[in-house]
Amino acid sequence: MKLLFKNKFFQASDLKNKHFLALVGNGIISVFSVLTIFVLYRALEKTEIGTWFFFITCIGLADSIRNGFLTTATVKFYAGTSPERGREVLGSVWFLASAITAVALLVNAIALPFVQYIHKPEMKIVIQWFGITYLSTLPTTVAAWILIADEDYLKMLWLRFINSGSMIGLILVYIFLHKGSLQNILIINLFTNCLTSAVIVLQGLSKFQTLRYRSKSTILELVQFGKYSLATNASTNLLGSANTFIITFFLGPAALAVYNLPQRLMEFIEIPLRSFVGTGLSAMAAAHNNKQTHMVSYISKKYAGMLTLAFIPISLVAFVGADLATQLLGGSKYIGTEAPNILRIFMFIAILYPIDRFNGITLDVINHPKVNFYKVLIMMAVNISTGIGGILLLHNLYGVALATPFTLLAGLLFGYHHLKKHLNGYSFRGIIRTGIIETKLLLNKILHKK
């Protein structure tokens, strides 16, 4: 790839930097996600938007089973291995991913005949569209696991651009033609999933041909590790989705549309977080596979510390500009709602997100997924109890939002306690100290390049 221009701040070598590519990839998907929400909030009514979020939440719960069972396991057992071992691992991964998808399709097929007896529109949408949507993402999902393990973030960047770019483009076309409806959005979502999967298969990125190299021993090895990882990921997703179900049940889809405004804006926090988690996970897995436990601790402290420091000014800016941000994304009809203050609550606690997230993936990497599972169960219990209690007490969305700080602190302290027992030199002080040192090194490198 040739650059049409270059200067002393940006060089072609930056395009090969895994952190840069991961950040840009997550940035593109987040920007397109925000743009999609921007259009939908102006094209659909609150009830339709709430129904769309409910459908996406249900799909996300199903994805958490497949992803939770195999994402970390694929990276852990595939990264840094020999070609022969790699083919065996990927073939076994494909076998298990296909089996999970087949079970989900069977459950959906059993539910379809009963859709006529269901009166809630959001539940009808889920049953009618779940199976085919879930199937359409299978090649993309497996390819994403492989690319994370290979640290091939440039290809991930293009795949995300194809998926997100085509979706926002088609939505804009439908809006321009005055055909913006929930059913058409569901069709567009399915089409873009199929398009991305087709590109992946044709380019050979899914490595489906490795299926013939699967082995019973490797399948059992993945299952043994994945059962705890699955429970953790599914519980984590359920933790994130619990408020969706609580709000829909107690306040309705329209209230869910208001609550999701600040949640969508949190995508800008997730951009660097997902990027560093992806690169950190593969780096820690490679270090652990090579018996370098001290490097696992160092990498975890480095990424968690740097992100914590970076999130402080970001959170302060977002705290001040919460009213403007929610108005820009949702439009004037959301002025005066709870959305800006809920965003402030989220941004206040977001400073602790990096430490909590890296606590979780580090526990998985050092073969303690069971502890991570218990961590998520504690968080889910705190979130559901405080969320329901808050909404019954306050009768509005603040009751649910105020559960977030208690939930995060419970999980963070539990995970931190167990990591201190297994990693030498792991402490809150060490995280911040390492973060400061690495941030200084990064800034010095940038200034030196300048």
Image: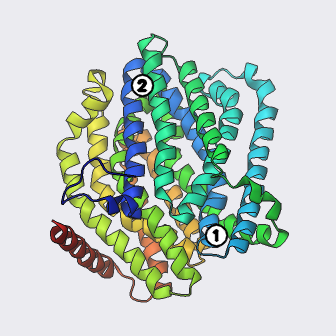
User: Where is residue 320, by image quadrant?
Assistant: top left
Q: Position of residue 199 (x, y in %)?
A: 61, 41
How busy is the neighbourhood of tag 1: few (under 14 within 10 Å), some, or many (20 plus)? many
Q: Amino acid at mark 2?
A: Leu
User: Where is residue 54, by image quadrant?
Assistant: top right
Residue at the image point whose x is 60% and y is 29% from the top: 191
Q: Amino acid at mark 1?
A: Tyr
Work out whether residue 181 can be spotted: yes
Work out whether residue 405 can be spotted: no
In this figure, which residue is indicated by the disc labeled 2? 40
Residue at the image point whose x is 27% and y is 75% from the top: 438
In this figure, which residue is indicated by the disc labeled 1? 78
How busy is the neighbourhood of tag 2: few (under 14 within 10 Å), some, or many (20 plus)? many
Residue found at the far top of this picture: 178
Residue at the image point whose x is 43% and y is 16% from the top: 175
Residue at the image point whose x is 73% and y is 56% from the top: 94
